[in-house]
Image (cartoon, rainbow, N blue to C red):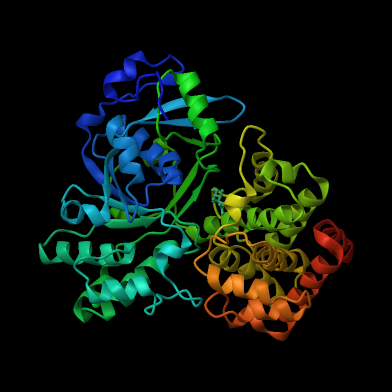
Amino acid sequence: MTSPLPRLALESLDRASPALERLAYSPRAAKIGVMHFGPGAFHRAHQAYIFHRLLRKDLRWGVSGVSLRSSDLQVALDPQDGLYVLAQRDQQERFLTIGSLRERLTAPLARQLVTQRLLSPDLRLVTSTITEKGYCLSSSGDLDTEHPDIRADLANWEAPSTFIGWLYLGLKLRRAAGIAPFLTAPCDNLSDNGGKLARAVASYADLLDRDMADWLRGERPFVSTMVDSITPATDDELRAMVADECGVYDAWPVQREAFVQWVIEQDGRLGEADWQEAGVQITTDIAAFERAKLRLLNGAHSLLAYLGLGAGVETVAEACNSAPLALAVERLWDEVQPLLVPASGLDLAKYRPALMGRFRNPVIIHKLSQIAWDGSQKVPVRVMASFVEALERGLPTEMLALAIAAWMRFCVAAARSGRNIVDPFAADLKRLGQAASDLPADADAFLDAPGIFNESARTPLARAKVRDAYQALVSFGEFGAIERTLRAID
Ligand code: CS2
């Protein structure tokens, strides 16, 4: 796409319109103190914004963004000196220039530089948004040592391709050089993300270097974090709006709602920084925050995606303005709420109404199809975990079961219409979808599919509940099944 406007860059910033908020620091003076793996739209709208705020007072927090595969980001942002526009879309619209992404690297093309950065004594933090599947875990939550990418990295550990492989390499080289380990703070929607990653890297080390594995278990340079901000994917409409409003052309702006939350587990190794002023909450109760966010926000998102798409609805806001879907969300939350734990700084009474307000934000066009991706990775942690726990405690589970069954029906519909399923288990899901016969046994086939759910999802009671919900969707359609579920609970 060509544009008569100047391309966003340090040199063109003063020609941008006043609507574009300028930088309060000099990006060229920033040092790289953070390496972020997976610098997609979510990172750039969220953590890079926090580092951008830290940089105003402390130039040690520049970010090196490492893409594990694609060079798209480098191609888009290198000609812009790494600058991009963050459009905050809410009651009040804001356009911010973000200058914290000081370097864009494409790992397979810049191995030496990535390794050098991992070894830098200035490196304080490694963060990630590599999505659930980037952890290469099995359904038990442990490293899947049979995962093809992990096997490839184990066979060639000095030239890794996975985040796990890069962390191992970086920590091992630092240790050998006598440099203190960096702290890793993953930002993916998984409960205990720091713990899962710590265990995964140690299990990987078990197969390469036992001494290193022991050291990793002793040092444990990992913390868990919870991230939250609704960030629809960038589209041409956003590019055009940014160009119109800001008077510069940005090849890859990002957008999000005004709400941003980053909660990090307290750890002395986080380094002195004014985290609070930058908008970060530090807590000793990270599990409570993760649980509430994953199960209320992400759980509701997945329910809306699968029930909503089945009913022909396209966006989260549209879905939440439809009474049956909004009621379904409220019921899901009723089922999840008793499973949550209180924590200081987490106001559960305000959480639900605030969330519904965020979902209804009229200027955020958050596509259900974007949320529906990677269901095999999301449904187990967002929905199935609550379902199993509620069942064990004898609590209501009908809406949770309906959300799980709706994901199954989504796969069936996609397989039948020949639509692509975006999921690491796409081939299996397609096969299951094609073999479906619209009978309750289909639900068993999904529950039994290897690698997705664990044994707790396959108890006779769990099966019966999911089968029943599945059958309701087949017999009555999405809205009919919701209505029946709401009646059953009343
Ligand atoms: C969404 C999340 O795409 C999805 O699966 O549920 O990306 C969600 O918008 C974020 O976690 C909000 O913080």
Q: How many marks?
A: 0
- Look at the picture and state if 184 lies above or below 86: below
Q: Residue at x 69, y 80 (%)?
A: 444
- Look at the picture and state if 433 lies above or below 483: below
The residue positioned farthest toward the left in the image shown: 177
Quadrant where the N terminus lies?
top left
Q: Which quarter of the figure has residue 177?
A: bottom left
**Could you tell whether 489 is left or right of 214 in the image?**
right
**Could you tell whether 162 is left or right of 241 in the image?**
left
State whether residue 88 appears in this view.
Answer: no
State whether residue 319 appears in this view.
Answer: yes
The residue positioned farthest toward the front in the image shown: 418
Quadrant where the C terminus lies?
bottom right
Residue 116 lies, in percent from the top left, at 15, 53
**Could you tell whether 470 is left or right of 253 in the image?**
right
Residue 112 lies, in percent from the top left, at 16, 55
Residue 107 lies, in percent from the top left, at 26, 54
The residue positioned farthest toward the bottom in the image shown: 460
Q: Which quarter of the figure has residue 430?
A: bottom right
- Judging depth in this view, the residue of 265 and 188 nearest the camera is 188
- Judging depth in this view, the residue of 99 and 347 nearest the camera is 99
- Look at the picture and state if 382 lies above or below 138: above
Residue 362 lies, in percent from the top left, at 67, 33
